[in-house]
Image (cartoon, rainbow, N blue to C red):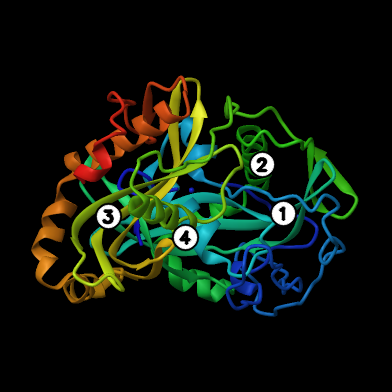
C-alpha cells in the first residue's frame, strides 16, 4: 500500500515500575480476524540503562491476561487525528504511524497502541532511505471501566527507515516498515553513533516522557469521546488524565453507502470500503475514491477493473470532514457477474518498494502507461475525491462544506452529481 500523499499518520513514556521493554518482544501471531484476541502472554525486558539491558528478563504484569471489564472496542491511535492539530510535524507523524501500526505485531483487536516519539536526529542523504534516530516507546492499553490499563509495552530506541517524496515544506515521509532497534546498550551505541550522547540526554528526561505520555493519552481520549478519566501504568496506581490539547470530535458521520444507481459500482465501492482500511473510530466513516484506468468486460466471469484505488477515513469537525487516515492500493479488481448481480472474486495489488514498477507492469499489462498517467494526475484524483464526498454529503443531508487533509487548507465541495458522475467514470 502507498501511504496517503498528504498524510502520514505519528509521542510518550518513562520506564515506570515494570521497567522498559523491547517493543518487538511481544510474541508474533498469525493474522486473525478482528474479533479474535491475540495471544495474551508478553515478554518484557528490564532495563538498567536508556537502552535495553543485555540480560533480558521475562516479566508479566498483574494487569496482563485480565479480561477487559468492558470488552469495548478501542479506536486506533492516529497521529493526524490525535496530535496534528498541535502542530503537524511530518517526521514525527511518520514515526508515530510506524510505531502505532507496523512495529508491534499481534495486539488484541480491542486494545490500542499508544506510542511516544522523541526524535534525536535525522539523516536525509538518501531520500529513498531516510534514517530517523529517536527515543521511542509504544504501549498497549485496554479499557477497564473508566481507566486505560497498560497490559504491555516497551522502550525501543533506534532508527526508523523512511522514504521521502518532495522537498522542503512539501516533503512527505512514509515508513518503509523496518527499524534498527537497540536491544542492548552496545546495540544502541552502534546504531546511534555520533548521535549517542544526544540520545542519552533526551532519554534521561523521565519527567518529559511521563508528561508526554499523559498528554497523548488525554488527547486520544478526547478526540475519540471516550468515557475514560484515568490511566494505569502499573498495578493499583491509577493517574488522572491532564487537560487535553486536542479538540473534541464534534459529531458522528453516517456510514458511507454508494449513492449511485449502478449495482456494479455499488459492489465495487462496498468491497473497497470493507477490505482496504482497518478498524476505526465509530464516529468516523470510510469513503473509497477509485481512480479507474480501464474496465475489461469481455468475460462476465472475470470482469477486470484496473485502477488506483484510494481509501480514506474521515471524522467531522464543525462543517469540515477531516482525514484521519488513508492510502492507495493500485491494482486490478476481479468481479464476476452472477444471476444475483455481481461479486468481487479477487484483487491484485501492486507491491511496495523496489518491486513496485515490475509488479505494476505485470498487473496492468497494456494499460500500464495509462496507469502511470492517472497516478501522476493529482489534480484529477482530487476532483474525483471531492465529488465522491460531495455526493455522500448530499445523500446524507449533511451540513458539510469542505474536506481537509492535515497540513493543508480545506477543500470546498462541489455541487452533488449523483445521477451521472459514477457512470461517467
Q: Distance between the residues labelled 1 and 3?
A: 31 Å
| Mark 4 / mark 1, whichever is N-terminal | 1
The answer to whether one can see residue 169 in this image is no
User: Mark 2 packing: few (<14 Cα in 10 Å), some, or many (20+)?
Assistant: many
Q: Which of marks 2 and 4 is nearer the N terminus?
A: 2
Q: Distance between the residues labelled 4 and 3?
A: 27 Å
Q: Give how far across and how far down residue 332 sits, in percent.
A: 28, 66
Judging from the image, what secondary structure is the residue with disc 4 in? Answer: helix
Give the residue at mark 2: 217
Q: Do the residues labelled 4 and 1 touch (CB within 8 Å)?
A: no
**Which element is circle 2 on?**
helix
- The residue located at (75%, 53%) in the rendering is 142
Question: Which label was assigned to residue 141?
Answer: 1
Residue found at the very far front of the displayed protein: 339
Count residues near mark 3 (Cα–Cα under 10 Å), then give few for <14, some for 14-19, many for 20+.
some
- Measure the C-alpha gap from mark 2 to mark 1: 10 Å
Q: How far apart are marks 2 and 4 (CA)?
A: 29 Å
Amino acid at each position: 500500500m502507498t501511504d496517503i500523499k498528504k498524510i502520514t499518520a505519528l509521542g510518550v513514556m518513562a520506564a515506570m515500575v515494570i521497567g522498559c521493554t523491547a517493543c518487538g518482544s511481544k510474541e508474533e501471531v498469525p493474522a486473525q480476524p478482528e474479533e479474535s484476541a491475540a495471544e495474551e502472554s508478553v515478554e518484557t525486558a528490564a532495563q538498567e540503562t536508556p537502552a535495553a539491558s543485555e540480560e533480558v528478563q521475562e516479566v508479566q504484569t498483574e494487569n496482563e491476561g485480565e479480561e477487559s471489564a468492558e470488552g469495548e472496542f478501542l479506536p486506533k491511535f492516529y497521529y493526524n487525528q490525535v496530535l496534528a492539530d498541535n502542530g503537524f510535524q511530518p517526521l514525527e507523524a511518520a514515526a508515530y504511524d510506524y510505531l502505532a501500526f507496523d512495529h508491534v505485531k499481534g495486539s488484541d483487536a480491542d486494545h490500542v497502541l499508544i506510542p511516544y516519539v522523541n526524535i534525536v536526529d535525522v539523516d536525509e542523504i538518501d531520500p529513498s532511505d531516510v534514517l530517523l534516530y529517536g527515543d521511542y516507546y509504544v504501549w498497549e492499553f485496554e479499557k477497564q471501566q473508566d481507566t486505560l490499563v497498560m497490559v504491555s509495552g516497551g522502550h525501543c530506541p533506534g532508527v526508523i527507515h523512511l522514504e521521502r517524496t518532495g522537498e522542503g515544506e512539501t516533503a512527505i515521509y512514509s515508513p518503509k516498515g523496518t527499524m534498527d532497534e537497540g536491544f542492548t546498550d552496545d546495540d544502541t551505541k552502534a546504531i546511534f553513533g555520533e548521535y549517542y550522547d544526544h540520545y542519552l540526554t533526551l532519554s534521561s528526561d523521565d519527567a518529559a516522557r511521563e508528561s508526554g505520555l499523559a498528554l497523548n493519552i488525554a488527547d486520544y481520549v478526547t478526540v475519540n469521546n471516550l468515557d475514560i478519566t484515568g490511566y494505569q501504568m502499573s498495578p493499583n496506581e491509577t493517574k488522572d488524565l491532564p487537560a487535553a490539547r486536542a479538540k473534541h470530535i464534534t459529531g458522528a458521520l453516517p456510514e458511507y453507502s454508494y449513492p449511485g444507481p449502478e449495482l456494479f459500482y455499488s459492489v465495487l465501492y462496498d468491497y473497497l470500503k470493507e477490505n482496504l482500511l482497518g478498524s476505526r473510530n465509530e464516529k468516523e466513516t470510510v469513503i473509497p475514491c477509485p481512480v479507474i484506468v480501464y474496465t475489461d468486460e469481455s468475460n462476465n466471469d472475470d470482469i477486470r477493473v484496473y485502477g488506483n484505488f484510494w481509501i480514506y477515513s474521515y471524522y467531522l469537525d464543525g462543517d469540515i470532514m477531516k482525514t484521519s487516515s488513508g492510502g492507495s492500493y493500485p491494482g486490478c479488481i476481479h468481479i464476476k457477474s452472477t444471476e444475483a448481480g455481481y461479486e468481487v472474486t479477487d484483487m491484485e495489488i501492486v507491491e511496495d518498494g523496489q518491486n513496485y514498477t515490475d509488479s505494476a507492469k505485470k498487473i496492468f499489462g497494456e494499460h500500464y502507461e495509462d496507469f502511470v498517467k492517472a497516478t501522476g494526475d493529482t489534480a484529477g484524483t482530487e476532483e474525483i475525491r471531492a465529488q465522491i464526498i460531495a455526493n455522500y454529503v448530499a445523500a446524507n443531508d449533511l451540513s458539510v462544506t469542505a474536506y481537509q487533509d492535515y497540513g493543508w487548507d480545506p477543500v470546498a465541495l462541489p455541487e452533488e452529481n449523483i445521477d451521472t458522475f459514477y457512470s461517467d467514470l
